[in-house]
Image (tube, helix red, strand yellow):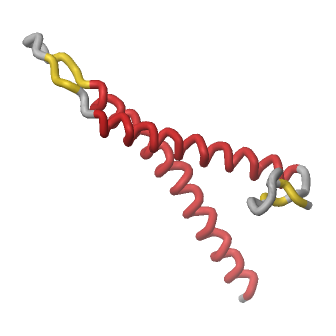
Amino acid sequence: MEMLTALWDAAWKILIAGLVLGAALPALFAVGIRAYAAGDGHEHADGSVTKGNPIGKVVAYVAFAFVVVVIIFGIATIIAQGQGETLDFHYFPPFHK
């Protein structure tokens, strides 16, 4: 029974990580793209121009920065585990055995 409990515990962790990294991160990137487009403004078919919203660009840059940080953290985790180390953010560099 302990094995089954451990299996379900691991399965839920994998499912949550898959949803976050497989769906939420690309969705956040898409929100960043949309916000950047809203920040640029656009020209209508009749020739009138809509001024961009600067808040859109700020939201886009924050979204892009978060996506980049998550990607870098993921790569660092893979590298650390491949070398038999763990990530530790109390010191620099963060890799420790």
**Above or below, 72 relative to 86:** above
Q: Nearer the viewer, residue 73 or 59?
A: 59
Q: Relative to the observer, which residue lies in front, 4 or 33?
A: 33
Residue at image location 53% in from the left, 46% down from the top = 66
Going by the picture, which residue comes out furthest to the left? Answer: 46
Q: Residue at position x 10%, y 15% from top?
A: 48
Residue 15: which quarter of the image?
Answer: bottom right
Work out whether 43 lies above or below 23: above
As drawn, 3 above or below 68 = below
Residue name at image x 54 percent, y 49 percent: 22
* 17 sits to left or right of 54: right
Viewport quadrant of the C terminus: bottom right
Residue beneath the point at 45% across and 43% down: 63
Residue 86 quadrant: bottom right
Give left or right: position of 56 versus 47.
Answer: right
Give x and y (percent) for residue 32: 40, 38
Q: Position of residue 88 (x, y in %)?
A: 78, 61
Say which of 94 and 13 sits in front: 94
Provide residue 42's location: percent of width, then percent of height.
Answer: 22, 21
Question: Given the current orientation, which residue lies at the most extreme bottom position?
Answer: 1
Callout count: 0
Which picture quadrant has residue 54? top left
Q: Quadrant of the N terminus?
A: bottom right
